[in-house]
Image (cartoon, rainbow, N blue to C red):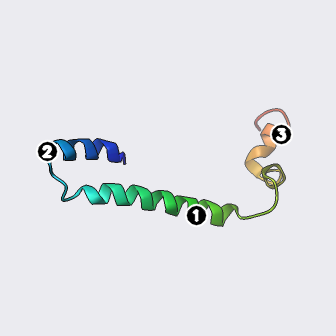
């Protein structure tokens, strides 16, 4: 959702009743996404160490896909 695409016409037509949902939902979505990423990724290990055991990357490490 792009709040600018909704905010511009709302300002031109002076219609502000439903615009709050576009502004609040994008902010809350960004905060929820940040929280979810932090919760899932919370580790002190570097990404390279984590990805060594990932099966989908084994073909890339050996020089090609299997």
Distance from disc 1 to disc 3, alpha carbons, whole Å, reads 28 Å
* In-image side of 45 versus 33 (left or right): right
Q: Is 64 in front, or is 34?
A: 34
Distance from disc 2 to disc 3, alpha carbons, whole Å, reads 56 Å
Residues tagged 2 and 1 counted as in contact (Cβ below 8 A): no
* Eye-nearest disc, 1 or 3: 1
Residue at (82%, 59%) from the top-left corner? 45
Q: Position of residue 27 (x, y in %)?
A: 43, 58
Q: Residue under label 1, please give it.
A: 36
In the drawing, what numbered circle is on residue 61?
Answer: 3
Question: Nearer the N terminus, badge 2 or badge 3?
Answer: 2
Quarter of the image with the C terminus is: top right
Considering every residue shown, the one lying at the far bottom of the view is: 39
Q: Residue under label 2, please give it.
A: 13
Quadrant hosting residue 19 = bottom left
Residue at (57%, 59%) from the top-left corner? 34
Q: Secondary structure at mark 2?
A: helix
Q: Is 65 in front, or is 38?
A: 38
Q: Position of residue 39 (x, y in %)?
A: 64, 66
Residue at (17%, 41%) from the top-left corner? 12
Quadrant hosting residue 35 = bottom right
Dot 1, crowdedness within 10 Å: few (<14), some or many (≥20)?
few
* Eye-nearest disc, 2 or 3: 2
Q: Secondary structure at mark 1?
A: helix
Relative vertical location of residue 42 with respect to residue 6 in this rendering, above or below: below
Dot 2, crowdedness within 10 Å: few (<14), some or many (≥20)?
few
Question: Nearer the N terminus, badge 2 or badge 1?
Answer: 2
């Amino acid at each position: 959702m792009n709040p600018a695409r909704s905010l511009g016409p709302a300002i031109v037509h002076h219609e502000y009743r439903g615009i709050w949902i576009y502004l609040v939902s994008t902010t809350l979505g960004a905060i929820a996404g940040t929280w979810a990423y932090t919760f899932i990724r919370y580790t002190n290990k570097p990404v390279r160490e984590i990805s060594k055991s990932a099966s989908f990357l084994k073909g890339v490490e050996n020089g090609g896909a299997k």
